[in-house]
Structure formats: structure tokens, C-alpha cells
């Protein structure tokens, strides 16, 4: 999640750092679905999965929430939304209320964990109960409904954060990749060609967005404010999946290419910011692409 951290720190070349969250969701869907497919049919399928997830996340999460709740009480902050955080449903607060929820600010970023936990709760049931073809159809349906629900929530609230907190389609893209990759549904050569095409289209789209919006308007609040922007946002799913597939098939090449892109982005953006843009106001010529998957 280096891109997200760099964005919050205001580092050069981090204008698209927030897309690391999308990459995180796609990667999570890919990894979790792969684990479930591998364990499918085993005697302790449910117990093994739920115990591992709970032991990995619950202790530190609830300790953090409890600490923030006590701190909020001590400082007079409202904790009226604590039940949402206690039940991993805080992402719905963005749709029901506003981006700024009533709970100590340190807990506001846990909306992504809420989406993860909802995925962990329901997805093992689907993988266990459905055959491969039915699971593929369900994944495609979730991708479609995920985009439609994001559009609906944006229409109802006019809050970009509401749409940002609905990224179920990103998880579904990862699941789709896992089903195809682990099930050998496509030859590796075909999969590699599709992934390369996805990366090329994705990079071209990001370059277009950069040229269209400018360096100061690259955040999700801009993307999600229009129907076209929402389509671009949804397109991050197949783009991130393409990166993951390429990383699996050509690991050394992908890492080298990612380092090259990140280095070039830092150098070029710094150059144009300090040299060209002061001379020609509004000049936009560089795109920064951060690839920082969180392999957990």
C-alpha cells in the first residue's frame, strides 16, 4: 500500500496513489478465492478459513476500536456510530450519512476492512456450494451489480465517498482471475496476451485521465463525480487484475518494469512541476503510476 501512504504524505508522483486501495481489493479477491478453491471439499473447510481470518484480524482491530472509543469518550467526541464499527458495517455509513462519520477520526479508514470482512463472511459459502461455471456467472454478476450499486449510491447521496466505499466489484475481479488462473480455463499464452493488453489499455487510460483532469484533480472525488468517471473507476478492476496476472507469469520482468515506471514518474513529475509548469501554466504532461500490492 506504498502508493496510498505516499499520497497521504504528499510525495511527488503520488497523484494516483489512492488506486493502491483498488489493487488491494483485487489482490485480496484473488488470494482469498485461490485459498478457498484449494481447500474446497476439505473436512475443516469452514473452520480453517474463519479461524485463520478471525485470529489474524479481530484482536488488533477490536483493540484499536476500543482504544479509539475510550479516547473519544475522554475527549468528548461522539461515538454514536460505534455499533457500525463493531460489526464491520461502517462502509455503509458513507452511503447513509456522509464521508465524515461520527467516531474518532483514526477509525475512519477502516471502511476497507469492513468490505473485506463482509467478503470473508459470505464468499466461502458461495465457493463451497457452487460449481465452477455457476461461480463464474456469480462473479460476473457481482461485477455488474457492483458498478450499478456504486452509481446508485452516488445518485442518492451525491457524495464521492459513498461510491468509493462500494468496491465489491474489485473483489469480484480478483475472484474471477483466481478462478481462471487456478482452474486453467485459459492457456497461459492467451492469459498473458490478455493481461498485457489490459495493462496497455489501463496505462493509456491513466495517461488520458492525467491529461484531461490535470495534476491537481486526480483523486477519486473527481473520477466519481460523473458517469464517465465512474466507468473509468470501474475499469481499475481489470487493470489491476492484469498487473497481478503478469506478476505471476513474469515476476522478474514485472517487478523491473514497475520500478522503472515509479522511478520515471518521480523524476518526470518533479521536472515538469519545477521547470515546465511554472513557465506554461496548466501544462500537464506526466502520469504517475504506483504499483504497490499488499501481499498478505
Image (spheres, rainbow, N blue to C red):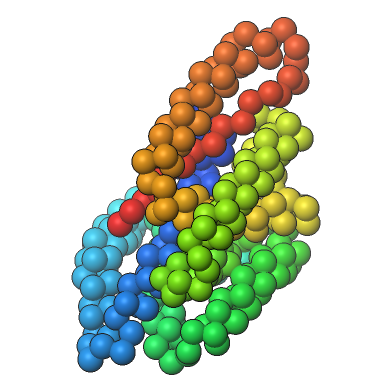
40 horizontally vs 6: left or right: left
Can you see residue 114? no
* Image vertical order of residue 253 relative to residue 72, above or below: above
The residue closer to the viewer here, 120 or 157, is: 120
* Image vertical order of residue 91 relative to residue 118, above or below: above
Classify the position of the N terminus by image quarter.
top left
108 horizontally vs 227: left or right: left
The residue closer to the viewer here, 249 or 261, is: 249
Give the residue displayed 73% in from the left and 31% down from the top.
211
Residue 226: x percent and y percent?
Answer: 77, 52
Determine the image quadrant of residue 50: bottom left
The residue closer to the viewer here, 131 or 87, is: 131
Give the residue displayed 47% in from the left and 56% down from the top.
245
Classify the position of the C terminus by image quarter.
bottom left
Residue 166: x percent and y percent?
Answer: 58, 65
Give the residue displayed 56% in from the left and 32% down from the top.
288
Determine the image quadrant of residue 35: bottom left
* Image vertical order of residue 291 relative to residue 41, above or below: above
Determine the image quadrant of residue 167: bottom right
Amino acid at each position: 500500500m506504498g502508493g496510498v501512504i505516499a499520497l497521504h504524505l504528499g510525495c511527488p508522483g503520488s497523484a494516483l496513489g489512492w488506486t493502491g486501495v483498488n489493487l488491494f481489493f483485487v489482490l485480496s479477491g484473488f488470494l482469498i478465492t485461490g485459498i478457498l478453491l484449494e481447500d474446497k471439499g476439505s473436512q475443516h473447510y469452514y473452520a480453517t478459513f474463519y479461524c485463520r481470518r478471525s485470529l489474524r484480524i479481530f484482536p488488533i482491530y477490536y483493540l484499536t476500536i476500543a482504544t479509539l472509543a475510550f479516547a473519544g469518550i475522554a475527549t468528548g467526541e461522539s461515538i454514536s456510530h460505534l455499533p457500525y464499527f463493531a460489526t464491520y458495517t461502517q462502509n455503509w455509513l458513507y452511503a447513509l450519512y456522509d464521508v465524515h462519520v461520527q467516531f474518532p477520526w483514526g477509525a475512519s479508514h477502516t471502511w476497507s476492512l469492513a468490505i473485506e470482512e463482509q467478503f470473508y463472511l459470505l464468499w466461502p459459502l458461495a465457493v463451497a456450494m457452487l460449481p465452477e461455471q455457476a461461480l463464474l456467472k456469480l462473479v460476473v454478476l457481482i461485477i455488474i451489480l457492483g458498478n450499478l450499486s456504486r452509481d446508485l449510491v452516488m445518485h442518492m447521496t451525491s457524495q464521492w465517498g459513498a461510491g468509493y466505499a462500494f468496491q465489491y466489484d474489485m473483489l469480484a475481479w480478483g475472484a474471477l482471475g483466481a478462478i481462471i488462473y487456478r482452474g486453467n480455463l485459459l492457456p497461459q499464452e492467451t492469459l498473458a496476451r490478455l493481461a498485457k493488453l489490459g495493462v496497455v489499455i489501463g496505462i493509456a487510460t491513466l495517461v488520458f485521465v492525467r491529461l484531461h483532469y490535470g495534476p491537481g484533480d486526480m483523486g477519486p472525488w473527481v473520477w466519481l463525480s460523473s458517469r464517465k468517471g465512474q466507468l473509468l473507476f470501474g475499469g481499475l478492476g481489470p487493470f489491476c487484475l492484469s498487473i497481478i496476472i503478469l506478476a505471476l507469469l513474469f515476476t522478474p520482468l514485472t517487478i523491473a518494469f514497475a520500478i522503472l515506471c515509479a522511478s520515471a514518474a518521480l523524476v518526470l513529475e518533479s521536472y515538469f512541476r519545477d521547470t515546465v509548469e511554472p513557465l506554461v501554466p496548466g501544462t500537464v504532461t506526466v502520469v504517475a503510476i504506483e504499483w504497490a500490492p499488499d501481499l498478505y
